[in-house]
Amino acid sequence: MLIRKFALVSLLCSSSFFISNAQAGAFAVHLTLTGESLGIIAQNYRISVDAISSANDFDDLTIQPNQIIKVPYLIATGGLAELAPSPPIGFLSHTLKSGETLSDLASQYGISIEAIIGANPDISSLDFLPIGLELLIPPEAGLVVTINSTQQLDAVLNDYGLSPKRIVKANSFISPAQLTRSTMIFLPGIKPTASLDRLAKVREDEHRYIWPVHGRITSYFGRRNLGMGTSNFHGAIDIAAPLGTAVGASRSGIIIYASWSKQGYGNLVKIRHNDGTETRYAHLSKIKVVVGQQIRQADTVGLIGSTGLSTGPHLHFEIREHNKTVDPLLLLSK
């Protein structure tokens, strides 16, 4: 872990962070960089996202560049030395190498990405994990939790509707009474819902707009020649793809239109996003959503078609900010 320390001077003179000199509740002050997420910062300081969120009274996990964040110093520097808890029986360990992705690991070990997340519920990102990160590889899908007492275990089992017998078998205990402080417990078959939801939000922060479909761009944003000395302004990009190919939502949001359009779009879907921006998906052969439906990034909104004013199967993809069209190629994740 690379930590840059500076003298105790004015915060305005520091490009990274300084350490407060208070013993009780001491903290580091971190100045966020472009591309950093709260999960990445927590991982760099070897503390939890919850610890940073609590220290800053965050309502959500979204951060911006050049934002000042307090990092609990005693937690970040480790406090009293403790041994890291051992992984559950049957788990493997994999150190992430350059170029490796969660998809690569899922294929290599014959498990799902969801299973990897369940074994590593505190990872900071789905797509931008640091080289050298040690990931646990589970024997099956489930959720790993850290338990500090039999009372806490009882509460967890009650929350997830699991029997002590099943947990004893999955973790090779003789009895739950064998639990010690900070014991990692594997809950087989439990979906890591909270981590999946958090990582979905992180991914959307990392990839504000994603490609709704992959294919050849047949018409770019801007003025285009229609022949015979005529032209018009094309406020979108056209992406050619086979008829019936699934079209995904570029961002999460709410469906505000899902019907036939009389303006040449053919079957059209409009999504309004939390910041008021809008994306449009036109010429669909089939619409797979309804007005008022909440949709997540990459969820299917319809199928590639050639309805409306169209000369072949393709997607007309449009982004509108403040009700003005914007070139999607300036905003789409690479």
Image (cartoon, rainbow, N blue to C red):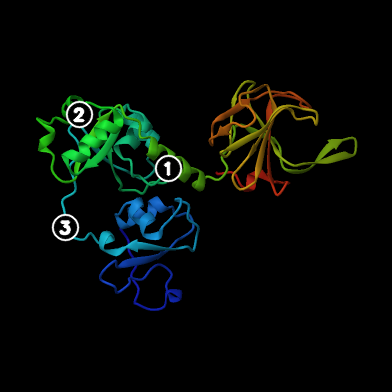
Looking at the picture, which amino acid does disc 2 mark? Ile
Horizontal side of residue 55 vs 312, given as left or right: left
Horizontal side of residue 4 vs 216, given as left or right: left
Residue bearing the label numbered 3: 81
Q: In percent of the image, x 39 and y 34: which residue is there?
A: 103
Q: Earlier in the sequence, mark 3 or mark 2?
A: 3
Can you name the residue that lies furthest to the right here? 228
Res. 193 image quadrant: top left
The image position of residue 299, as x and y in percent, is: 54, 31
The image position of residue 121, as x and y in percent, is: 33, 40
Q: Is residue 263 above or below residue 183?
A: above
Number of numbered discs overlaid on the protein picture? 3
Horizontal side of residue 130 vs 240, given as left or right: left
Residue bearing the label numbered 1: 198
Nearest the camera: 242 or 126? Answer: 126
Q: Circle 1: is it few (<14), some (14-19), or many (20+) Cα within 10 Å?
A: some
- Please, what secondary structure does the residue beneath circle 1 have? helix
- Please, what secondary structure does the residue beneath circle 2 have? helix
Res. 126 image quadrant: top left
Q: Disc 3 versus disc 2: distance between alpha carbons?
A: 29 Å
Looking at the picture, which amino acid does disc 3 mark? Ala
Q: Earlier in the sequence, mark 1 or mark 2?
A: 2
Residue bearing the label numbered 2: 167
Q: In percent of the image, x 32 and y 61: which residue is there?
A: 2
In the picture, the quarter occupied by the C terminus is top right
Q: Disc 1 versus disc 2: distance between alpha carbons?
A: 26 Å
